[in-house]
Amino acid sequence: MNILKSLLASAAILVPAAAMAEGETIGFSQIGSESGWRAAETTVTKQQAEERGYDLKFADAQQKQENQIKAIRGFVAQGVDAILLAPVVATGWEDVLEEAKDADIPVILLDRNIDAPEDLYMTAVTSDQVHEGMVAGNWLVEAVGDAECPVVELQGTTGSSPAISRKQGFEEAIAAAPNITITRSQTGDFTRAQGKVVMESFLKSEGGENICALYAHNDDMAVGAIQAIKEAGLKPGEDIKIVSIDSVPDIHLAMQAGEANATVELTPNMAGPAFDVLEAYWKDGTMPPKWIQTESKLYTSEDDNAAIYESKKNLGY
Ligand code: AHR
């Protein structure tokens, strides 16, 4: 708690808390840096915090939930004013979030959901991840028409909400098209390196000529897979259609080159809405809805991908 806030509290003066927003200390437990999208989210969060005059305590969990739990406990011990949590997996958060609740520290979830009672966090700023999968699936249904289309799927981190929900949404979208079937599905952990390795194994086991499309739960895995497809002597985007999620600059470069076909945008600005909510809460106790949904926009090779790449390339991806 900052000095101004404690002085005012001890003098029992009622203050417009807008005056107290500047100088607040925010703990941010980030998953790691598995993808370009994640790097951009970190950049944007730091920028937003700086612009608003917050002291941001940043903890990189290196993809491990235990590190995130440790970081949250550390933030509670330091008495931060709020905690942002991008949860690596969906389960196992109850105990540590109870501790934050007992200490009266609001927790806001960023970009991923958790399986826990809603009273353990203030709000979640996320996309509709089932919808993202559906947008990707609907694009494919439209793109292939009646042709037989065996699909390989690169899943995100096992147990994470986007991996679970993007799979579900895609499956729901293709359910009405019996010509489209998922023949192989495996995690690539949201990384470029694993995307490439797993795609190589798909190509080996299925044979490239038997794969009509790749659905990747993020663009980084798609970019790794594109490399594997090229090394196998095939043309990504033509021999194998590619649809993924995030809209990172590199996938727009790939679309521009005809090597990828579609992506669903996920904004890296989750912190802006989170900080707006906190400021309203500090001002007059306004409680936000439990879910603040961000937009999911489809881009395809029909768009001006060179221009989109230019507009995004310096945003911290
Ligand atoms: O939770 C959002 C997902 O996490 C992004 O789509 C992916 O790139 C990231 O690692």
Image (tube, rainbow, N blue to C red):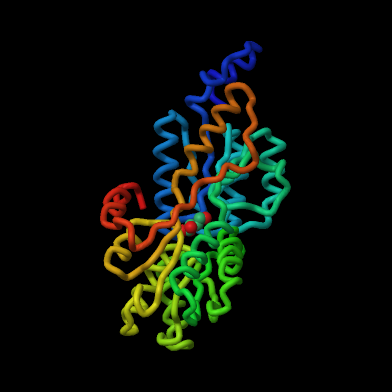
Work out whether 111 lies above or below 1: below
Percent position of residue 259, x then y: 32, 70
Q: Quadrant of residue 8?
A: top right
The number of discs equals 0
The residue sitting at 53% across, 69% down in the picture is 155
Q: Quadrant of residue 290?
A: top right
Q: Is residue 235 left or right of residue 218?
A: left
The residue sitting at 30% across, 48% down in the picture is 311
State the residue lying farthest toward the front: 146
Percent position of residue 108, x then y: 59, 41
200 and 183: which is toward the camera = 183
Work out whether 10 lies above or below 54: above
Q: Is residue 271 left or right of residue 40?
A: right
Q: Is residue 100 left or right of residue 30?
A: right
The residue sitting at 46% across, 60% down in the picture is 245
Q: Is residue 235 left or right of residue 183?
A: left
Work out whether 225 lies above or below 277: below
The residue sitting at 52% across, 58% down in the picture is 132
Percent position of residue 81, x then y: 58, 32
Work out whether 315 lies above or below 138: above
196 and 309: which is toward the camera = 309
Percent position of residue 283, x then y: 58, 22
Q: Which of the image's four quarters has the N terminus?
A: top right
